[in-house]
Amino acid sequence: MRTRAHTVPKFYLAGFASLEAAREPFVWIGFIKTGEIIRRSPRNVATTRGLYDGPGGFSDPGASIEAHLAQIESDAAIAIREMSINSPTAPAIVSPAIWRFLAWQAARTPEWMVLVQHWTNDELGHSDLLTMTHMQAHEFQATHFPKFCWTKLIAPEGEYFITSSRGVSWIVDGYADTPPAALRDPMAQIVAPLTRSLALVGRYAENRLNVTPRDVNRSVAFLARDWIAGSTQEVVRQALADRRVFVH
C-alpha cells in the first residue's frame, strides 16, 4: 500500500481556513477548469498516493522525504506563526525555516513535477524524480530566493489572500510555467502566500510595492493550473473571475 501524502501541507492550508469554521477547519476550493467552488477540509485537499515513497537523494539510506518534510513543516509552522504576529510595519526578515519550507513548496507540486517530466522527455523514474525534486528545493533556497528583494504584505481587515495547488509560483515578464532558471531574469517575480492575512512577494526591484490582496490573488489564480483555495467563497469567486479576465 502506497503512503498517502499531501503535496500542499495540511497545516499550511489551515492558515487559509474560513473564519466561520466552528469546529473543524475548512477552505473554499475553486477549480480552474470548471469554476466550481466547494468547501473542503484541509486534510482532504492535495492528496496523492506514493509521492514520497522511495529514496530522495539522502546520504543516509534510511532517511526519507516524508520524515524530512515533516520536520521542515513543523519548523515552518512555528516560524510563520511568529511572523504573523509581528508588527505590520516590521521589515520582511524571513526565518530560514520559512525559506526551507517555501523551497519545498516550489519544488514538489504536481504541476512542477509534470513540467520536469516534460522537460526531460518523460525519461525519469520515480526515484529519479524524488532526487531531482530534493536538488531543486535546495537550488530554490540556496541560489534563487536570496537574490530577490522580499516584501511582506499584510491584508487589511476584511480582505484575504488565497493560495493554490502551487503554494509558491513565479512569473517572468508575463510568462507562466517557466523553468526555475528563468528566475535569474530581472523581470521575474515570486508570489508566496503564507496565510489568509500574510504573503511574501519577491522581486529584483527595491522600490516600494503597492499592491492589494486582490492583485496578489489575481496572480495566484493566473499561475494556478488546478485549483485555488481561500477563506471565503467570495474571495475565491473574485479570484477566478479576475483570472478569466487576466487570461483573455
Image (cartoon, rainbow, N blue to C red):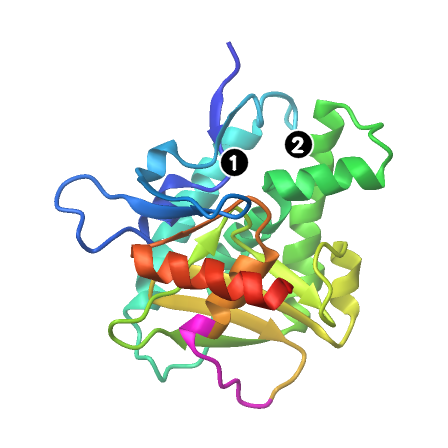
Q: Is residue 52 magenta?
A: no
Which quadrant holds residue 194?
bottom left
Q: Is residue 210 magenta?
A: yes
Residue found at the far left of this picture: 22
Which quadrant holds residue 173?
bottom right
Q: Are marks 1 and 2 in contact (CB under 8 Å)?
A: yes
**Neighbourhood count class around disc 1 (C-alpha, 10 Å): few under 14, some 14–19, many 20 upward:** few
Name the residue tied to disc 2: 58
Which amino acid type is marked by label 2? Answer: Phe
In x, y percent, where is residue 120? Answer: 85, 37
Q: Residue at x 66, y 30 (%)?
A: 56
- Residue 68 tag number: 1
Q: Is 144 placed above or below 115 here?
A: below
**Residues shaded magenta:** 207-214
Q: Main secondary structure of the magenta part?
A: loop
Which amino acid type is marked by label 1? Answer: His
